[in-house]
Image (cartoon, grey):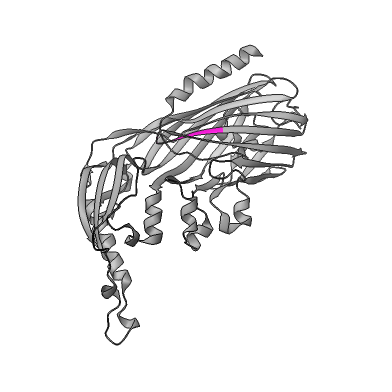
Amino acid sequence: MKRHIKYLVIFLIVLLPSVKEGTAQESYLLKELRIPQVAQENPGSVIPYDAHICFPLVGKIHVGVNSPINYGDIMTVSDKLLDRVKKNNAIRIWGQIDPVHFGFRANKKNYISITTAIKTDANISFKKDLASFMIKGNGPFEGKELSFLGNDFLLVNSYAEIGVGYNREVNDDISFGVNVKYLLGLFNAYTSKAELLLYTGDKYHELNVSHTLQGKMAGIVKYDSNGVRVEDIYENLKNHGFAIDVGARYRINRLVEINASVLDIGLIRWKTNAKQYNVIDKTFSVVGIQYDDVFKDTGTAISNLDPNGYLREIADTITNNFIADLEESSSYTKWLNLRFNVGGSIYASPNDRFNFTFTGKFINGVFVPSGCISYHRNCGKWFDFVVGNTFKTNAIFNPGVGLNLTLEVFQIYLAVDYANTFIFIDRARNLNVALGVNFVAPLSKAKVFKASYPY
């Protein structure tokens, strides 16, 4: 047993230094269900089927959001929002859809799978001064400088992947696996250095904007001084890359099992429509809205009010300045969004187990930890469920539930990691939902797994 634990430690030490910056999807309860998609969360998980094929386009639909502020804060903006906003904040969004996903068992102990997916991750960060400006305006900050953005302001990654997975059950106690994936980049944007400062002059409507922005972007759409244009997309599919997932599972004894995985170790070479920002301390002025500009004394009150026109003028001034700073760039390489999972299970009975998972993500070089504890129950071959709680730095209490219904060959599953989002809408700040439909072939031999999924 000590030898296997030593190998697990070496496994983590060797792979974790390859982690680069990036945001990443979350999956806590999903990986505890009895579904083929568990191999996407840990390639070393046991797949208790002889074969599977997903329903086209809905093998897996996965969407999620992490936000520092909740829905109620947005709908009823007030000074209370500023009490919850930290000095540095980030909004993270991700989505995935699997158009094709199938697999089959070979020689009893091997499972081969073919996967396709379209994935998008985005991370947008901002500072507390931006929230203060949005709520209070610039009036209270006459003669003061507000800082809106930091170096990790933007990170967006969108790509398609085609993968081949291999899973090996060495015996009832040990299994491992690997997914090898070809990647086709659709869009990428990131900032390596970003700063946006706003200074309010002696008159409240005089605003000076100073910004530093260094970063790159590329994708199958074209950006120029005329805005965004879509041209010859099929000829622009030149952003190629690769990635691997690795994972393993080890049953220590009758009661305890441990597992670990590292996902999306890879990169994309971005060539198509590559652009860059390389702006240092550029300053421009924006003329704000004065009372007399909006409320004109013409004797007919409402018909002459057009604040949107002035707001559009300010937005156009800022947008035109930023678009004008776009420059051509050579191709560049960007590492994928990456996460790792380390977890374990304690079996209370052959059909009941308690699980824990620790997840690590790296957002623009910043380590973001989270975790989950859960209880899983097998209710025969047709149904299993999991309930648990996710722990995050911005919210400790996040109950969730996962359900899997398998009727002969038809399977439908759903995992919701933040169930309280749908109960207390006004407090919702996190969302993570995964669902899908599969057709599965039960094991031809009534094998009894001592490992992850005992029948």
Residue farthest to the top, as pictured: 3
Q: Position of residue 280 (x, y in %)?
A: 21, 42
Instruction: Name the quadrant containing residue 37.
Output: top right
Report whether residue 65 is seen: yes
Residue 343: percent from left, percent from top: 62, 29
Q: Residue 358: name its quadrant.
A: top right
Is 270 left, or right, of 90 in this rendering? Answer: left
Residue at the spot x=29%, y=65% of the render? 312
Q: How many marks?
A: 0
Magenta segment range?
359-364
**The N terminus sits in image quarter:** top right
Q: Nearer the viewer, residue 424 or 20?
A: 424
Task: Note whether 275 is above or below 199 in the view shown.
Answer: above
The verdict on residue 220 being magenta is no
Q: Is residue 422 above or below residue 21?
A: below
Seen from the viewer's position, the closer of residues 384 and 87 is 87
- Report which quarter residue 373 is drawn in: top right
Residue 414 in sight in this render: no
Q: Is residue 203 above or below residue 236?
A: below
Q: Where is residue 209 drawn, in percent x and y?
A: 25, 53
Q: Nearer the viewer, residue 41 or 92?
A: 92
Residue at the far bottom in the pictured view: 299
Dominant SS of magenta comes to strand
9 or 426: which is nearer to us? Answer: 426
Q: Quadrant of the C terminus?
A: top right
